[in-house]
Image: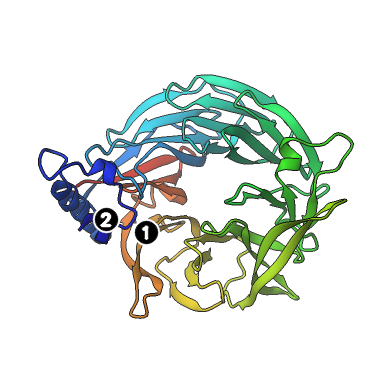
Amino acid sequence: MCLQSWGFCNLAVLGSEHGNHSWKRYYLRRCRLEMKMTEGRSGGYTCKSLRGHTGKVVGLVYLQGNSAQHPDIWSSSATVCSASTDGTVRAWDIQNGELLWCSPVQSPLTVIVSDEKQDVVITADSTGLIKTWQGQTGQELASFTTASPHCTILQYNINNNWFLTVGTSQGSVCTLADPALTQKSSVMVCDTFKVNTLLVSPDKKWITAGTKDNDDLSPKVIYTESLNSPSEGEDPLCQSVPVSGCQAAVFIPTQPARLAIIHHNQRPNNKALTVFDVSIKKTKYKSEIQVQQVESFPLTLNTSSSHILLEAKDSNCLVLAAGQELWVYSLKGALLASFKDHTMPISSISVDSFRVVTASQDLSLRVLTWRNDRDQRLTLESRYHLLGGSHTMSRGFTHVACDYSSIVASAEGMDGKDVLKAYSFTS
């Protein structure tokens, strides 16, 4: 029954038929939890307000959470870290609403990410200083200066080796190794324009880097190995993607290196989505990157918003948000679903194997769940709103993140002090 309901179910946590952790108890608890997460009724979850930041929250990440593949539904503790323009990183126990640690004050922070194993937090501040923090204790591990007021950060592991690639406001991409932050390489990608698109492919062989600030520039695909262990005197292996004016990009999670890009399409307000496969062709004397178009279709987004959010669910499902609307497309361009649940623009989205959560400036979160339709195609179903308080105190939600049994979002405070709202569902 467990395996039929959840094909990805972790048998290790099921145990025998008897005892506290039997598969029957697991099945009942997980069904109850999913029903509560699907219905969103009061009593099915708790909401905690996490206060302490004295500035704007620039990002939040889960450090310890419940994954959808292997949820530990017997214990539902989760730790979330938030970074703010007040110059601090704060770690929170979201079930109890407690502050676990707070970093010393530095220049205003601009971005936060966690590493793949979720035990290190990485931040950058407005002077371009990058720091790594131990997730459990908040102890500073290392720092590296880029002298860039805007940084985009990407962390990934290759064969147990830890790497951090940083896009700067000068248009370069710098790669550092180990949490000690040893510089490996630096390459110019989009001269004088800030790098604000930075992605790594699922097979970790490719980095996509580009800017959304110039309609004439194309994003580039770089061979990861030539950034992490560059050959002396040789330029990194790099290839432009044959589209310009990149607005959003994402790698398809179930493919080795399939890249979807939303870009300008001749006329300025006209946008298209094009899908490419990236590969390498090696001959006796040289290696060449091949970027081959797989699909391309026009997008009819009824919005002039340049703030477009793009996520991928599986091998054939793209989730887009722009303005107040959310769309689900197949990779061939079929519109599978569209929603207009918000009265103000969507500021952030979170996509996992169970649901999609949209955060909006209207101070609400919308929860939508995945299901298969009659033709066994994946589609989304809109479920309920989670409210973030009153507009007298807050302007709207700016960021949202989820694990399997909780949702955390940051609300912009009228007094300049942002607050985190943590919604925890109980089994």
Q: How is the image coloured?
A: rainbow
Residue under the point 38% across and 56% down: 365
Asked if labels 2 and 1 touch by Cβ distance under 8 angstroms, the answer is yes
Q: Is residue 168 visible?
A: no
Q: Can you give x and y, in whole percent of width and height, for residue 209 in the image?
A: 71, 50
The picture quadrant where one finds residue 304 is bottom right
Q: Secondary structure at mark 1?
A: strand
Q: Secondary structure at mark 2?
A: helix
Q: Can you give x and y, in whole percent of width and height, for residue 297 in the image?
A: 63, 77
Q: Can you give x and y, in whole percent of width and height, for residue 17 in the image?
A: 12, 45
Q: Quadrant of the N terminus?
A: bottom left
**Which of these two is toward me, 176 or 327?**
176
Q: Can you give x and y, in whole percent of width and height, for residue 419 in the image?
A: 41, 40
Residue under the point 51% across and 41% down: 59
Q: Is residue 206 above or below residue 111?
A: below
Q: Is residue 416 above or below residue 101?
A: below
Residue 73 horizontal side relative to residue 322, left or right: left
Q: Disc 1 marks which residue?
A: 355
Count how many numbered circles sit on residues in the image.
Answer: 2
Residue 255 horizontal side relative to residue 420, left or right: right
Question: What amino acid is found at the position of numbered circle 1 in the picture?
Answer: Arg
Mark-to-mark CA distance, 1 and 2: 9 Å
Q: Which mark is residue 319?
A: none
Q: Is residue 174 above or below residue 23?
A: above
Question: What amino acid is found at the position of numbered circle 2 in the picture?
Answer: Met
Circle 2 residues within 10 Å: few <14, some 14–19, many ≥20: many
Q: Disc 2 marks which residue?
A: 37
